[in-house]
Every structure is written in C-alpha cells, then in structure tokens.
Image (cartoon, rainbow, N blue to C red):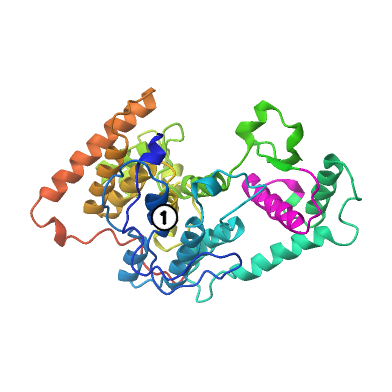
Amino acid sequence: MSCAAAWSPPSSALGRNPSLRGGRRRTCSSSSSVRPRAAAAAAGQEQEGGGAGEAPRLVLHDTLDAAGVATAHARAAREGFAAQVGRLTRVNAGTSIAISRGADLARAALCIAAEDDSLVSHSSVPLPVDAFIARLDDLSTGFCAGGNFPPSRAPPEVFFDYLDRYLYVHKVLTCRSGSALMLALIYSEILKTVRIYGLLDFDAEIFFPTDLNSLPRGYDKQKSKLGDEPHIMTSKSLLVEILKTLKATFWPFQFNQSSSLFLNAVAANHHGPGTLGDNQTRSHGNISAIEMAAAKAAQHRLMRGVWTNVRFGDMRRALAACERLILLQHDPHELRDYAALLYHCGYYEECLHYLSSYQTAMAGQSASNRLEVLEDEAVDTLRARVTLILAEDGWSSRRPAASYWTKNSEPW
C-alpha cells in the first residue's frame, strides 16, 4: 500500500456542520465550517490500513473569525469543495477527466477560486460560481450547435480540430496558452456534454503534457500507445495539481528556488514565527541594498493585504491550499508542509500534532535522495523545537501571529 493510502487526514479537520451533500450544479453555500465527509467516507469505505490518529481542526477559517475577518463566503466555498471531494470514491478518483465520473470537477475548481477570492478581496459578494458554471455549460452546448460541430462520422482527428478551433474562437485561453490544467478541465467538460448528447462515437481521451511548453490535446484512445498512460489526467490528480500549483505560488518562503517549500519554511524558523521582513533579509548577506529595499516595500504591502509580491507570498491562501490538499488525502507530505506554516502562525499544538501524524504515516519508509534526508532532519528539528516551546511556562498566553489575519480596507 502506498503511503498516500495509509494515512487518514484529520477527522475533525473542517469544523462543525456537515450540511451540504454534493450534486452537480449546486451552489457553494453554507454558513459554517464543514467536516471532512470525504475523509470519513474514504475511511469507512475504502481505507485498508490504519491512519495517523485524531488530529486537530484546520485552523484558517476559525482564526480569521477570531481576528474579525468575515469568513462566511470562504466557508461556503470550502463546503462546496468538500462536497465534491466526498463524491470521489476510489474508482472515480482514478478515472480519466475525459470521463469525469463522481465529482463535478468544474464546480470543485470554481469553489477553490471562490474561497481564494473571498480570502483576499474581503468582498461582501461571493464569486458567482453558478454563473461561471452556466457559462461553461453554454460553451459546451454551443460547440454542439450550429456550424461548430464536425460533420457526421468525421474521424477523431477532425473532431478535435473543430474543438480546438472552437476554443480558440471563444478565447478560452488567450492565444491557446496559459494554464494547461484549466484547458484540460474545459476539454473534459465539453467532452462530457458531447457524450451526454450521444454525439461522441469514439473513445476520447485527453493527453496531458508533462513539460511547461505544451498544451493538453484530445485523441482517440483506441490509437493510444503504452507511453501515453502517464499522460492521462485523473479526476483526483487534476484537483491535486491545481492545489499544488496554488500552494507553490502563494508559499510565503520563496527565497531559495533550488530547495523545497518545506525546507524554505524551516530555514526561516530561527527568525521567529510570523516574521518575514527585516530579520529574513538580514540573514542573507549577499542581498543587495536594492533587493533589501524591495523586500521591505513588499513586506509593507503584504501587511496591508496587498498580495502582489511572490517573494513574500500569501499565508492565507497558502494555508487554504494545504488544507484542501489534506482533504484530498493525496500525500502525507501535505501534513508536514501544513505544520510548517502553522509554526509560523504560532499554532504550536496543531503544528506538533500534524508533524506527529506525518511521521506516523511515513513510518518504515526511508529517504531515497539527499533532499529527502534534509527534509527528514528538518522535520525532527522542527518537532523538537515545537516540543520545547510547548514545555515553556506561559506559552499558551502568547497570541499567535496576527498580521496575516488583519482585515484590510485596501486589499488590492
């Protein structure tokens, strides 16, 4: 059994009220946190091994509430995402997005966008998920109507030529470049609609590229080769890749691009939780005065809620991406990465529990390269440090770092 299948995410991870059950074309609406129905279903129906035990809640929404930041829209979006994840059975999760059974991938992706939009914009109006879903439906049905659809009995190559031309005309992605993940998602939604209408007379598949310069393309699965297998994007892997991209984009510690996100976070630990500004810049003697000034200016914008600088990332959206990855039960390393962020936010008990859950899930596995050795050593170091902090008298009276949660009137 793989390590990803051997661990269970926090069973109390999402909060309080499991009120929404997933269904296609439903709104992302709820007034409270959700519980990990996906985790419960997976544990009850599909998991074969023991998990890492009971773990604390996911902290983001509750801590924002405590700081006076409204989270109703963010919670509703998370509830909508969790509802779709709850529909990912083991079979559905491993099904190609060209078939897309179980979860509504478009709605799940839009709920991710809706939560992130709520976290950064402080808008009183949620992202119109249903309107985007309706637009995507119109795009799909529009391909089947008029002169956009290929002639009857046209070969698969002609079908995909028509589809590519249609997507270009409608400017799904400018000049057919940009996010390969989103283009693959749109491909899958259109193929699903064509299949529902009974207009697809061959077994279509989507080839997802592994390089950064190519785009997804459709092809006839009956003409596939053995080498095409790794390029088939499944329902679960699509959501995982979307969230991993967001996590890497918003990770607050980007100063060493050759290292891992986790090692960068641990390397910043000796500056204290929640400190990213002057202390971090002083630790790198080779940073020029111009770079230091730019870093200070970026930190000032970040503290005001202006999330425009990659160097300092966005703690809120990085935490949100980590929490959603934990719900997907993709990889126990997500527990470790989430713990590293919790340390910087001052949530030491939760940090220690997630580190313990990670080490339990990874028990018996040895590092296979130098980077993994360094990461294992960093986990031990971080756990020892958190244990010492928790052993100090009066640690619980200290307030966690609040600069990430402040409600700002100037979000852009």
Task: For mark 1, give the secondary structure.
Answer: helix
For disc 1, the neighbor class at 10 Å (few under 14, some 14 to 19, many from 20) is some
* Count of labels in the image: 1
Q: Position of residue 79 (x, y in %)?
A: 46, 65
In front of the other: 395 or 380: 380
Q: Quadrant of residue 108?
A: bottom right
Q: Is residue 283 above or below residue 59?
A: above
Q: Position of residue 309 (x, y in %)?
A: 49, 51
Give the magenta-colored segment's residue range: 175-202
Q: Main secondary structure of the magenta part?
A: helix
Q: Quadrant of residue 220?
A: top right
- Decide if residue 231 is in sight here: yes
Question: Residue at point 36% right, 44% down?
Answer: 337
**Magenta region includes residue 244:** no
Q: Position of residue 105 (x, y in %)?
A: 59, 55
Question: Residue at point 50% right, 64% down?
Answer: 80
- Decide if residue 216 is in sight here: no
Q: Is residue 190 left or right of residue 32?
A: right
Q: Amino acid at mark 1?
A: Ala
Question: Residue at point 39% right, 58% down?
Answer: 36
Q: Is residue 235 left or right of residue 375?
A: right
Q: Is residue 192 left or right of residue 341?
A: right
Residue at which label 1 appears:
41
Q: Quadrant of residue 403?
A: bottom left
Q: Position of residue 55 (x, y in %)?
A: 27, 52
